[in-house]
Image (spheres, helix red, strand yellow):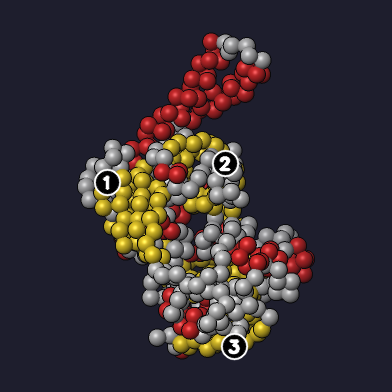
Amino acid sequence: MLFKKTILCAWIGLLCASPIIAENIPPSKGEEQLLKQISKGFSQVAKAATPAVVYIESQVEVKPSMRSGRGPQENPFDYFNDDFFNRFFGFPYQETPKARKETARGTGFLVTHDGYIMTNNHLVEGASKVSATLQNGQVLSAKVIGTDPKTDLAILKIEGKDFPFLAFGDSDALEVGDWAIAIGNPFGLQATVTVGVVSAKGRSQLQIADFEDFIQTDAAINPGNSGGPLLDVNAHVIGVNTAIASASGGYMGIGFAIPSKMASHIMEQLIKDGMVTRGFLGVTLQPVDVDLASFYDLESHHGALIADIIKGSPADQAGLKQEDVIIAYNGQKVENLNSFRTAVSLMPPGATLNLVVRRDGQTKNISVTIAALPAEISGPNSPMQKLGFKVQPLNPELSQQLGLKDLKAGILITDVESGSPAAMAGLRPGAIILAVNRKKVESLEEFQTALREGAVEGRILLKVVQGDSVRFVALHFD
């Protein structure tokens, strides 16, 4: 706390001193002392935290995707041999390549004295070999303990004891403008320290992960920083650096970190069980805009509108109804849809969720006993993996980028694995899924629900738009 006050005072002094410096007038002795305090403060954080930051390398086998152009195996429904899809997804259409090995490089940090390391899932997912290089140059083999693709987090383990490690801070207590310090290995430059501020909180709908509640920072983050810590002035981890917004692939002042509250929760489960169990409510939600707020007689446009309820789910059993508007949970207002979804996902099965809802102009209090989220649709041995394709939601902005004027919602197929049931059925990246088993799907939640139901039955029927054609595709789970 003393350091935090010192650096704040020093920063105020720097602002006062800046006009003098700009005029090339040497700072006074007091001003010089303040500048030294700022420098000393950041160097203390770097000195305390850097020994716990490690360099991660993993060997990953990249499977080929069905991105082939026209030729002997041309599919009559494959009309994506044109420019707009290439520009958006950044790949040319060519014959399907063979599987190849690639090296992924990034950052991680020790979270316990006995060698547990936190990093990003995208650095180690599917890796055959992972290594961690300590700050003293020692290279150790790392074992993947557990991964969570939905938050892009993973836990590794190296053998040894008495390692330096970092403690988690309270990301909920962060305020916009607070100092943020990133340590990582951008472009392989080990133990690089950069400084900025917290630019925003609660960033979502970035299509980076399924559960998004990112801290935005202007601390310089580049390729190779992934999985590294974002620290406060007490050298506590407030976030896990994950992604950047960039037109060039390098730093442009916008980086995103997974908040420590979410990261520490995922860490505990992965270390204990090797997997993550999420809370399940069983509803399809949509945000409340100004027009909906007026229609449902709400005081503000904050809240979550229940568009659908899964039969037999905790929401159904508790008596929630379609068109209920959730305005508060466990004493907190629903400021945005994503924060509410994230809060529910972090609740353990059996926990009680106390909701305040608006129904037919009246306010009701409803308690729900949270269940465990059913089997994931993506990840090892999941329905999605068995079918062999990946998806993301289609929103109006993405639809415009792809030149799809008449389609504003749906599920976009972004990747199809060679030889998979999806590939054999003729599905290609760029196809839009409109319905599953004759049920319209416009959101990822609706698609997930429909896919789970189809997995139980052993088959699904997709209605897709592919090129200029609409067709139906039947897929079977092996």
Return the residue found at the far front. 72
Which numbered disc, 2 or 1, marks the residue that appears first in the sequence?
1
Q: In x, y percent, where is residue 11?
A: 56, 26
Report crowding for label 1: few under 14, some 14 to 19, many 20 or more residues within 10 A (C-alpha).
some
Count the marks: how many? 3
Disc 1 secondary structure class: strand
Q: Is residue 268 above or below residue 50?
A: below
Given residues 325 and 330, the one toward you in this image is 325
Q: Amino acid at mark 2?
A: Asp
- Residue occupying image coordinates x 58% and y 48%: 248
| Spatial CA span between label 2 and label 1 | 31 Å
Q: Amino acid at mark 1?
A: Val
- Residue occupying image coordinates x 52% and y 82%: 73
Q: Is residue 220 above or below residue 440?
A: above
Residue 80 visible in the picture: yes
Which numbered disc, 2 or 1, marks the residue closer to the eye?
A: 1
| Spatial CA span between label 2 and label 3 | 46 Å
Which numbered disc, 2 or 3, marks the residue that appears first in the sequence?
2
Which numbered disc, 1 or 3, marks the residue that appears first in the sequence?
1
